[in-house]
Amino acid sequence: MDEKGLQTEIRRANDACAVHGCQVSVNDYWRTAIEEGCDSSILVKRIWLPPMLTPD
């Protein structure tokens, strides 16, 4: 999704949540979330974890 589309979707979510008394949390797009007035934003650092080793 491009930046303009993301902004539009966040605005729609904010509008819907305002009507229903909910909060919007946006994952990963923290700058856009702040610009659009979201209640919170979550920046998730993706890390790789090795598969679990199973006993023989």
Image (cartoon, helix red, strand yellow):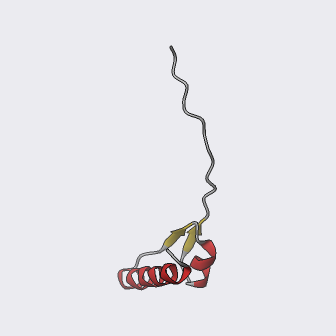
Task: State left or right for residue 13 relative to residue 50.
Answer: left
Q: Is residue 42 above or below residue 12?
A: above
Q: Residue furthest top?
A: 56
Q: Position of residue 15 (x, y in %)?
A: 42, 86
Q: Residue furthest front?
A: 2
Q: Position of residue 6 (x, y in %)?
A: 50, 78
Using the image as rendered, state which of residue 54 and residue 15 is in the foreground. Answer: 54
Where residue 40 sits, quadrant-wise, is: bottom right
- Please name the residue shown 37% across and 85% down the image: 19
The residue depicted at 54 percent of the width and 30 percent of the height is 52
State the image coordinates of residue 9 (x, y, percent, origin top left).
45, 80
Q: Position of residue 26 (x, y in %)?
A: 52, 70
Q: Residue at x 51, y 22 (%)?
A: 54
Q: Between 56 and 36, which is closer to the camera in this rendering?
A: 56
Height in image: 45 above or below 37?
A: above
Q: Residue at x 41, y 76 (%)?
A: 22
